[in-house]
Amino acid sequence: MKILGKFKKFSSEISVPSDKSITHRLFIFALSTKKESIIRNPLLGADTLSTLAIVEQLGGMVKKQEKAIIIKGKGLRDLDEPTDILNCGNSGTTIRLFSGLLASERKGLFILTGDNSLRNRPMGRIIKPLSIMGANIFSRRNFLAPLAIVGNKNGLDGINYEMPISSAQLKSCLILAGLKANSDTIIIEPFPSRDHTELILTYLGVNIKKIKNSIYVYPSEDLNPFDLTVPGDPSSAAFFVVLAVLIPGSKLLVRDVCLNPLRIGYIEVLKRMGANIKLEYCSFNPEPIGNIFVEGVEKLTATNISPEEVPKIIDEVPIISIAMALAEGKSEVSGALDLRKKESDRINAVCFNLRNMGVKVVEKEDGFLIEGTNELKPSNIKTFDDHRIAMAFTIASLLANGESSIDNPSCCAISFPDFYDKLKEL
Ligand SMILES: O=C(O)C1=C[C@@H](OP(=O)(O)O)[C@@H](O)[C@H](O)C1
Ligand SMILES: C=C(OP(=O)(O)O)C(=O)O
């Protein structure tokens, strides 16, 4: 696909697809009640559809309505043993959250696998603590999927676990396992990562406490049914926010976005660089939701990202790198080693594509250094079949000085199926 450069100044109001992380969780929580729950405005992207299909395989009864999914769950325990493998597709969230939910079952065999990318992503981070809890969980060599789980008839023990990395998927995996364990669980994270699991479970009446970086999880009964609306995805909004910031005189309003502070770290980073962004909060329970107002500025200034900040911008690093490439001065990202373990090696993918656009970049093991430039050259974008790389470099191409091409735009369907139609709305 060809992408024209020199995108003109615009003034628009848009909405973005619903939040991927929250949709995954609401589908799984709905399975964990015995009654009917309503998930309004869910994201029906490839990743969340993988989760929904697995909810059905485990006994959830799913009804699709125009703008809602209704799920009659099975309760927290005694899920159906699936008659086939559980295909998590491209989704790390799906495989890691279900592993926690299923490792704590008392009977049944569950095989979890996914596409080529997912089968190369690290699963040791969940296998190790789940095994300490007593789970029967097996993998290929080097802790790679497919994973095989055999229910433990005695159930799992709680765990007191200091996580080696900040990861909301690992934390949520252990919370789900802890809810069904025989004793209490304490999970400690180095730096806070997104906390949708904790916030929504608390809203549903589950006894789960957060004190500083520790999360206390107590064995729970079936969850209560719910009727919740999924807000817009701040990670999807980020692509348009950066585009508006980088075109002087542009104005953009993105409505009804999840403004959870652990998800909008990128707005803090952009503001630090000189962006003009304002937030309007509209509602709070269980997640803060509101509107993002952006005005384009003449020039951003460089900034550094520290390891502590990384969990709050983990999915936005590729699009932030485009803002850094067009900022005045040298920017640096550090402590982002885990980006090499996403759908693609995102550190390498960012450096590769920026270099092809004429930007001076130094690739480090845990991040990169970018020297800002005034102009991006058009190039042939290599997506590495990674949705975030595809969308970040589509935005870069729109800002470039001529026509670019992109190898696999369709991978955007993982989190943002109508990304290119939305761009036309601008
Ligand atoms: O819990 C979640 O919904 C997610 C957590 C993050 O992964 P990690 O927990 O591996 O950092 C993030 O990159 C992913 O897009 C979604
Ligand atoms: C890393 C991502 O998702 P997941 O880990 O669920 O595949 C992402 O959406 O950028």
Image: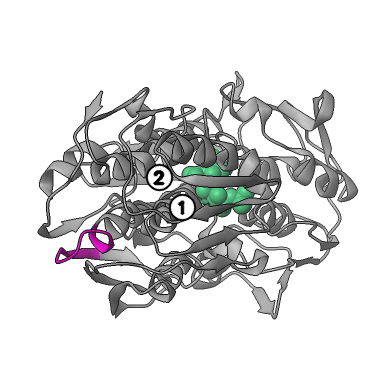
The circle drawn on residue 321 is 1
Residue 246 on the magenta segment: yes
Measured as percent of width and height from the top left, residue 51 is found at 49, 37
Tell which of 320 and 100 is nearer to you: 320
Q: Quadrant of the N terminus?
A: top left
The magenta stretch is 244-255
Measured as percent of width and height from the top left, residue 414 is found at 40, 35
Q: Is residue 191 left or right of residue 305?
A: right
Kind of residue at badge 2: Ile
Colour scheme: one colour
| Quadrant in the rendering for residue 198 | bottom right
User: Element type at marker 2?
Assistant: strand
| Quadrant in the rendering for residue 138 | top right
Q: Which residue is mark 2?
A: 71
Residue 213 in view (yes/no): yes
Position above or below: 9 against 408: below
Measured as percent of width and height from the top left, residue 248 is found at 19, 64
Q: Which residue corresponds to the image point at 35% horizontal and 52% vertical from the top-left? A: 39
The 10 Å Cα crowd at callout 2, few under 14, some 14 to 19, many 20 or more, is: many
Position above or below: 365 against 171: above
Tell which of 92 and 359 is nearer to you: 359
Q: Which residue corresponds to the image point at 41% horizontal and 64% vertical from the top-left? A: 328
Mark 1–mark 2 Cα distance, whole angstroms, equals 39 Å
Residue 112 in view (yes/no): no
User: Element type at marker 1?
Assistant: helix
Kind of residue at badge 1: Ser
Q: Which residue corresponds to the image point at 84% horizontal and 40% vertical from the top-left? A: 153
Tell which of 356 and 86 is nearer to you: 356
Residue 121 on the magenta segment: no
Q: Which residue corresponds to the image point at 58% horizontal and 43% vertical from the top-left? A: 347
* Labels 1 & 2 near each other (Cβ < 8 A): no
| Quadrant in the rendering for residue 163 | bottom right
